[in-house]
Amino acid sequence: MALIAFDIGGTQIKYGLVERDGTVLSAALYDTPKHCGGEGLVAALIQLAQTLQQQQPVEGIAISSFGLIDAENGVVLGAAEAVPGYTGTAVKAALQAALGLPVSIDNDVNCVALAEGWRGAAQQVRHYIAVAIGTGIGGGIVLNGQIYRGHRAAAGEWGYMWIDGLVWEDHASMRGLVNAVNADLQTQLDGRDIFARYDAGDVSIVLHVERWFGLLGKGLANLIYAFNPQRLVIGGGITARGDAFHRQLQAAVQAALQPDFQQMTELVLASAGNHAGMIGAVRNWLDEHARE
């Protein structure tokens, strides 16, 4: 029997039906009701779930969400500014009461990490880290096959680390690269524009991108020192550059590591796909309810 899966983002909610083996049966998008607060967001989830329930029987609701999430109690703890009033919302209890189905919820990057271990680039790996590079830099930590959430569900918030006297994600994220280039060159380029000019050998762009890779590599090296993962899984839109990005990032990380650490961790690109949040939410649901 399938599950209803939600991947709640600050802009859109991805939702659909996912089987127990991680196969996505259906997926659709719904604009996140940003101005309706936590109650409005929960009401939208209930309505969408009821529509899916009419299509076929389901056995549960699996949720991936932005923000700091208390996975055990199903409450949003913080870092959820995209939806005013979302912090403090008891999502799990509300959906269980309304739908009469068991519900699980976890942070979105934790769910992506679970998806990579289940259906993606970290299969059969017991110790790995998934790093998402986008407007910020966050990720999920898997130790001995289990998500490590930390004391207040804030593990993996390494975007706030200081690297070379800078807040890492402010400068090593895609947002950081775009802001640096546009401020220096007085342009309005996006990430694709920047890498097109980089590939063409534009010297003014090359300097920025090389500096960006250096900062990114140093931060990832620090994660390797701290966690000694077998595999480091890198996700985010930039990974669409494929082998070229992989080679450049690998070189930057190796340059930042002491020799004894250079061969300890394998760096790979994420491969769970566009539905990783939904797939990981289902993996989390299965793990949670296997313990009951």
Image: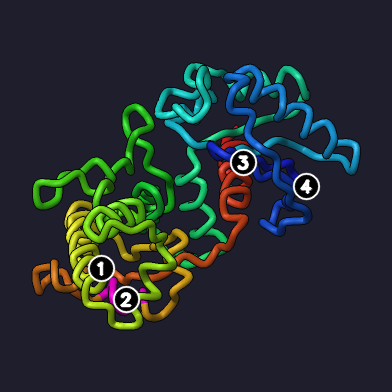
Q: Is residue 249 magenta?
A: yes
Quadrant where the C terminus sits is top right
Q: CA distance from mark 1 to mark 3?
A: 30 Å
As measured in the structure, the alpha-carbon distance from the residue carrying label 1 to the one carrying label 4 is 44 Å
Q: Quadrant of residue 24?
A: bottom right
Q: Report which residue position mark 1 lands on.
A: 209
Q: Earlier in the sequence, mark 1 or mark 3?
A: 3
C-beta proximity under 8 Å, tags 2 and 4: no
- Name the amino acid type tagged 4: Ala
Whether residue 88 is situated above or below residue 58 in the rendered picture: above
Q: Would you place residue 185 above or below residue 11 in this image?
A: below
Label number found at residue 198 = 2
Image x and y of residue 153, in percent: 38, 32
Q: Residue at x 22, y 71 (%)?
A: 204
Q: CA distance from mark 2 to mark 4?
A: 45 Å
Query: From which residue to which does the magenta span run?
Result: 245-250
- Residue in view at x 48 percent, y 70 percent: 240
Magenta span main SS: helix
Q: Which residue is mark 4?
A: 2
